[in-house]
Amino acid sequence: MTLRLEHMDQELDKVFYKAENHFFQGEIPEAAELLRSLLSDFPESGKVNWLMALIYHRHYKDLDKADSHYRSAIRFSPENSVAYLDYADLLSTQERSSELIALLNKAMELPGTGKDRIQELFGLLKEKQQKFDEAIAHYRDGIMNCFDTERIVELEGAIKRCQIKKKY
């Protein structure tokens, strides 16, 4: 039985990486087809649900299906920090503030999660609520957790944007 499960995992990985390659090559229909096939055999695969969610979210703009797959991705692979951040983008876009806050707080506890991105998302939430001082504080925390110069410049830009908005 163990050998059979190991073979199934290898098959899952093989097809998943093929789908992921299609995705990154911009071959979205091919990636989606492979992922749908995988989901019929492995509905509890977090990584398959995550990539399917990303396709529904960013390419097909079917936010209900994206939401469902993000939830499954996090449920079945709670250690996949990327799924949290991608789902947070969807929640932010839909202005689902309470869900976003809960998700970001949970993501903050995960090792390896981009704390700079989490702080940026908190900042965007506060900025949308016109709580500019709180937004600036989050953007500053993002800078302190960031080691990429370009991202730091982006976060500085967000701070400047909030400072301008405070004048009005």
Image: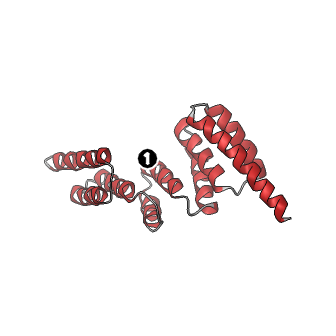
Of the 4 image quadrants, the one containing the N terminus is bottom right
Question: Position of 108 compared to 9: left or right?
Answer: left
Q: Position of residue 41 (x, y in %)?
A: 78, 51
Q: Quadrant of residue 145?
A: bottom left
Residue at x 39% of width, y 57% of height? 118
Instruction: Indicate how the structure is coloured in the image.
Output: secondary structure
Question: Position of 92 compared to 163: left or right?
Answer: right
Residue at x 57% of width, y 32% of height? 25
Q: Is residue 118 above or below residue 29?
A: below
Closer to the camera in the image, 80 or 75:
80
Residue at x 47% of width, y 54% of height? 85
Given the current orientation, which residue lies at the most extreme left position?
A: 167
Amino acid type of the residue tagged 1 in the rendering: Thr
From the image, tell me which residue sits under label 1.
93
Closer to the camera in the image, 137 or 6:
6
Q: Is residue 73 above or below residue 62?
A: below
Tell me the element at label 1: helix
Total marks placed? 1
Given the current orientation, which residue lies at the most extreme right position?
A: 1
Question: Position of 130 compared to 79: left or right?
Answer: left
Q: Residues within 10 Å of mark 1 (few under 14, many from 20)?
A: few
Q: Position of residue 78 (x, y in %)?
A: 57, 63
Given the current orientation, which residue lies at the most extreme front position?
A: 3
Q: Is residue 35 above or below residue 98?
A: above
Q: Position of residue 33 (x, y in %)?
A: 71, 37
Q: Position of residue 3 (x, y in %)?
A: 83, 61
Residue at x 57% of width, y 51% of height? 67
